Image (tube, rainbow, N blue to C red):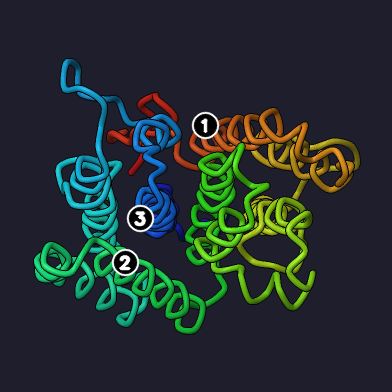
Amino acid sequence: MARDLLSRIAETLYWIGRYVERADDIARILDVSLRRALAGEDDATAVFAILGHPLVPDAGPPTAATMVRRLAYDPADPGSIAGCLRAARENARGVREIISTEVWECLNVTWNALPETRAAAERLGPHVYLRYVRERAALLAGLADATMSRDDGWRFLVLGRSLERADMTSRLIAVQTGVLADSAAWRMLLEACGADESFTRTHRGDSTKVLEFLLLDRLFPRSVVHALATAERCLAELAPNQGRAGTADAARAAIGRVRMTLEYADTAALPTRLPRLLDEIREAGAAAMLAIGDRFFPGAAPAGWVRGGSSWAGA
């Protein structure tokens, strides 16, 4: 890592990437779940479990309305969409001299417009809010890639985004586990990942290739393999001196092992191996996150970040 980039700044950029990506992906998961609820398939409890959010004791099974209120609108919950965007904006305030003006303005405008967007969603339906979040997250990613130098600051931003994307894509797939034989279900999953058109051009709508595309495709930017490879590349550029044998980077090792497992997976066996593969992806992401903190952000003051049913450290 460059000497002139303080570990505090590096950590802040890393968590901006994670927070914005998580807001985007929660919006995608909620969109899938709400559309399934319209078809009579209420899986709100499963969504809470997959995202690691505890249920309120004695409150009864969560409903679609509960899910939207807690996972989308609640700014006090660090694992909700509003909570993630608030955290990203507050982090960005501390590194305004590092990120571009366009990136800061995008985050600031996004946060300030959330109350008005929520009010519109309460009149017209939650998809208004979810679509807004997805569009703003895409705009932010584009602005970061177009206006920031490819230095260590940008690498930490992309590293956080890529690790979160791999983790959350696996969670999106987990929401649909068991119903992918239904053509409407796999089509809904592809649309949630922004993959529908790319998948159709690549596989001509062959539903047996959905898991292969979202997990293994090297060219689609939201696939798990692509996200893991991007994270690996960022880590290699941040700490390039690895010696002649092995790697001393525990984060790269964790990511590399699960990426190679996916790279050489038997595509015909994906449906039967899916639960274990999804667990391995999430476990590798958690191990990499802890290793990155130990290596690049030693002694940093932790803040709450709820995921996977556990409280992790974040900026």
Q: Left or right: where does residue 233 sit relative to residue 87?
A: right
> Which disc, if any, is residue 23?
3
Labels 3 & 2 near each other (Cβ < 8 A): yes
**Quadrant position of the C terminus in the picture:** top left
**What amino acid does circle 1 point to?**
Leu
Q: Left or right: where does residue 108 sit relative to residue 45?
A: left
**What amino acid does circle 2 point to?**
Val
> Which disc, if any, is residue 290?
1
Q: How many marks?
A: 3
**Quadrant position of the N terminus in the picture:** bottom right
> Which disc, if any, is residue 163?
none
Camera sees residue 237: no
Of the numbered discs 2 and 1, the one sitting upstream in the chain is 2
The residue located at (35%, 53%) in the rendering is 38
* Badge 3 density bin: few <14, some 14–19, many ≥20, Cα 10 Å: many
Q: Nearer the viewer, residue 264 or 274?
A: 274
Q: Nearer the viewer, residue 256 or 265?
A: 265
User: Hey, which residue is sitting farthest front in the picture?
Assistant: 40
Q: Nearer the viewer, residue 301 or 276?
A: 276
Q: Return the x and y of residue 92 as percentages of the image width and height.
A: 28, 62
* Badge 2 density bin: few <14, some 14–19, many ≥20, Cα 10 Å: many
Camera sees residue 166: yes
Q: Return the x and y of residue 110 as percentages of the image width and height.
A: 23, 71
Of the numbered discs 3 and 2, the one sitting upstream in the chain is 3
Q: CA distance from mark 3 to mark 2?
A: 7 Å
Of the numbered discs 1 and 3, the one sitting upstream in the chain is 3
Q: Return the x and y of residue 101 as percentages of the image width and height.
A: 30, 81
Quadrant of the image occupied by residue 77: top left
> Which disc, if any, is residue 133?
2
- Secondary structure at numbered mark 2: helix
Labels 2 & 1 near each other (Cβ < 8 A): no
**What amino acid does circle 3 point to?**
Ala
